[in-house]
Amino acid sequence: MPRPAPARLIVLRHAKSAWPHGVPDHLRPLAGRGRRDAPAVGRRLREGKYVPDLVICSTARRTRQTWDLVAAQLGASPEVVFEPRVYEASASTLVAVLRDVPDRKRTVLLIGHQPGVQDLVLSIAGGGEAEALARARVKYPTSAVAVLSLTGPSWSHLAPGTATLDDFTVPRGTTVTH
């Protein structure tokens, strides 16, 4: 029997958010630039054939809005879980969340926050495309997308060094999407 393709993890930092006075962090919305960039992320995922079958999204308003705008461009309807543990999570918490993913889910999109998303990518990437790794180390800006292939046998085995960084991009949009 042929061996299945490696599982794929896509790690997205939410799009650029606004900082309205008096609004708690969890409720901050996307800024204009974020509303332009998030659809570009969705197009990039679709064009790169990085369409998830499971989305794990922080419960923060800006991550939910990012997902809504990304989803509109995918041409697919993956299962979506709004996971409270992803908000303000450390890399180790994100690994714990991902270890619970059923093995039948082969491509997972995680939408979260800094510094957890960057720390997660750098922690689990045991290698990969050298230029992408260097860029991810220097800066993980809003709307940045890391695509990793898992080298371990299952999501439950996710640990430092058990993935390869295949791609790191920062899609930017040019038109406002409401």
Image: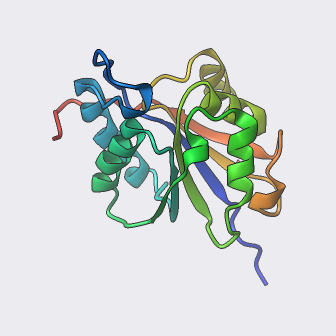
Instruction: Specify whether 47 is left or right of 116.
Output: left
Instruction: Specify whether 78 is left or right of 146.
Output: left
Where residue 130 sits: x, y (%)? Answer: 69, 27
Please tell me which residue is depicted at 73% across the width and 45% down the height of the picture. 95
Q: 94 or 25: nearer the eye?
A: 25
Residue 121 in the image: above or below residue 43: above
User: Which residue lies most toward the bottom here?
Assistant: 1
Quarter of the picture containing the C terminus is top left
Residue 66 in the image: above or below residue 172: below
Please say whether residue 136 is visible from this viewpoint.
yes
Where residue 36 sits: x, y (%)? Answer: 24, 32
Q: 56 or 7: nearer the eye?
A: 56
Instruction: Specify whether 54 is left or right of 100.
Output: left
Please tell me which residue is depicted at 66% across the width and 20% down the height of the picture. 137
Residue 79 in the image: above or below residue 95: below
Please say whether residue 126 is visible from this viewpoint.
no
Q: 21 or 151: nearer the eye?
A: 21
Quarter of the view holding residue 138: top right
The colour scheme is: rainbow
Quarter of the view holding residue 41: top left
Please tell me which residue is depicted at 43% across the width and 39% down the height of the picture. 60
Quarter of the picture containing the N terminus is bottom right
Quarter of the view holding residue 89: top right
